Structure formats: structure tokens, C-alpha cells
Image: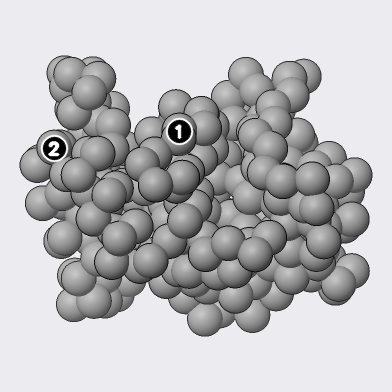
């Protein structure tokens, strides 16, 4: 049994080295796994399943090839790619997960999340998250032409970068009480998430654990779970 977890690749035309590193991962590592979970912010932005940009189409094709090898593929919305729908899943062979989702992992109850909903101290972002996950707001956005959505995505990205630069680091990390609350309500022994770009393993009370995936920038990050346990791994992106 081998299960892989990744998140926060932020795939974008401006970062071809990350895209190529991901393709190598799909070719060399992922086919040996029973399942691959992508826990959000896979793309820097996803403007809708009708996106005809070469990167969007090529990535879906690469994912579809992986799913055809027998590796089960799962994907979760992030704060930058919350518009995945049925068409994306059909094209890629992926199953869309709700956030949070609970699975059995090596005999333990494991909770999977993107992680942004745990950053409750960042009240400005939490307000935007509530708006962005509203089905009516999403439907209105998706009704706009592709080019209009591309322009809006660029504006939102610039606003996000400006706001993040002005916020204290601890505000953008998870809230410990929010973590304890969701793990208690979901009866989870292990929590795996991304979003914060702070890869680490945290030991919690009562033997519980929180594992955080890193973002793909200078390094690629993944978590592998097999008969030997849980490991957080990284390697250089050439």
C-alpha cells in the first residue's frame, strides 16, 4: 500500500520548471502508488472547466494518463482553484473530494483538507472564502466570457499578493483551536493539509498528528504513506 499527497503546486505558464517537475513526478513516482491526492491550489488559478489554455488542457491529459495506469486520483478545491467541476473530473479521471474529507489511512482515521478554512485569524480572507464558495457567486462568475474571467483572476491574484504582504505571518497560519475542533468533530487521528506553505509534522495532544505539505517552488514536496508509516519528503526542482 502506497498513497501520495501533494498540494500547492500553483501551476502557471510563468513557472514551466514546476510543470515539468510535476510531469516527471507523474511519470516516475505516481504510477507506483495506489492513489494520489491533490489537496488544493494545484493551479495558480482555475477559471472554469471550459478553460482552453494549453497548460490547462495538457495537465488534464497528463492526469488522465496516470488514472489509466490504475492509480486512483483525487483532487480537492483550494483557495485559488475552487471552480473545478464535473468536466474537469471527466477529462482528468479524478474524483473531486469535499473539504474536509475523512479516509482510513494505514489503520488510522485521517482528515484531508486544503487548510485555508483553518486560518480563522485571517478574517479578511475568511470573508472572501465565504463569498467564493457561494454557488450563486460562482455561477455568476462562470457565466462571464473566458477573457473576462482571466482578467478578473489576474486582479484577484494581485490583490491577494498585496494583502498577504501586509499581514503578520501568524495570521496566515492555522488556528490551533480550529485544528483541535475539526479533528475532534471528525474523530480524526491524523490531519493532512496544505495552504500555509509551512511543511512540517506536528505532534498534538492524545497522540494525534498534523502533517503540512509544502508548496512547489524551489523544492517539490509530497507525503507518502505506506507500510512503513507517514513521511514528508522534498526534492529540488531543477
Left or right side of 71 for 161: left
Left or right side of 146 for 166: left
Position above or below: 142 against 32: below
Residues at marks 2 and 1, CA–CA distance in whole angstroms:
19 Å
Q: Is residue 186 visible?
A: yes
Q: Which residue is mark 2?
A: 121
Mark 2 falls on what kind of element?
loop
Q: Is residue 18 visible?
A: no
Residue at point 58%, 24% (across, down)? 217
Q: Residues within 10 Å of mark 1 (few under 14, many from 20)?
A: few
What colour scheme has been applied to the protein in the rendered image? one colour
Left or right side of 121 for 77: right
Mark 1 falls on what kind of element?
strand
Name, please, the residue furthest toward the front: 206
Q: Which residue is mark 1?
A: 202
Q: Nearer the viewer, residue 95 or 101?
A: 101
Tell me whether the residue at label 2 lies in contact with that at label 1, contact meaning CB atoms closer than 8 angstroms.
no
Give residue 235's position: percent from left, percent from top: 74, 24
Q: Nearer the viewer, residue 228 or 82?
A: 228
Q: For the N terminus, which image quadrant? A: bottom right
Give residue 75's position: percent from left, percent from top: 56, 63
Residue at point 63%, 50% (across, down)? 5
Residue 74: numbered disc: none
Q: Nearer the viewer, mark 2 or mark 1?
A: 1
Left or right side of 32 for 45: left
Give residue 174's position: percent from left, percent from top: 28, 38
Position above or below: 130 against 237: below
Q: For the C terminus, which image quadrant? A: top right
Amino acid at each position: 500500500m502506497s498513497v501520495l499527497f501533494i498540494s500547492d503546486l500553483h501551476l502557471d505558464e510563468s513557472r514551466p520548471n514546476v510543470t515539468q517537475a510535476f510531469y516527471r513526478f507523474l511519470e516516475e513516482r505516481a504510477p507506483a502508488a495506489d492513489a494520489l491526492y491533490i489537496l488544493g491550489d494545484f493551479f495558480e488559478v482555475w477559471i472554469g472547466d471550459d478553460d482552453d489554455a494549453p497548460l490547462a488542457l495538457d495537465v488534464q491529459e497528463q492526469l488522465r494518463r496516470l488514472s489509466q495506469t490504475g492509480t486512483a486520483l483525487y483532487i480537492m478545491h483550494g483557495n485559488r482553484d475552487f471552480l473545478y467541476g464535473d468536466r474537469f473530473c471527466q477529462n482528468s479521471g479524478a474524483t473531486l473530494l469535499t473539504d474536509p474529507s475523512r479516509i482510513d489511512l494505514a489503520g488510522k482515521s485521517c482528515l484531508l483538507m486544503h487548510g485555508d478554512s483553518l486560518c480563522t485569524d485571517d478574517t479578511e480572507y475568511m470573508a472572501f472564502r465565504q463569498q467564493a464558495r457561494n454557488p450563486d457567486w460562482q455561477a455568476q462568475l462562470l457565466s462571464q466570457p473566458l477573457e473576462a474571467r482571466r482578467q478578473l483572476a489576474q486582479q484577484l491574484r494581485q490583490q491577494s499578493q498585496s494583502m498577504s504582504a501586509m499581514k503578520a505571518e501568524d495570521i496566515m497560519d492555522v488556528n490551533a483551536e480550529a485544528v483541535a475542533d475539526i479533528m475532534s468533530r471528525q474523530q480524526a487521528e491524523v490531519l493532512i493539509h496544505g495552504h500555509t506553505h509551512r511543511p512540517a509534522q506536528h505532534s498534538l495532544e492524545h497522540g494525534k498528528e498534523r502533517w503540512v505539505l509544502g508548496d512547489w517552488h524551489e523544492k517539490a514536496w509530497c507525503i507518502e504513506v505506506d507500510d512503513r508509516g507517514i513521511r514528508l519528503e522534498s526534492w529540488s526542482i531543477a
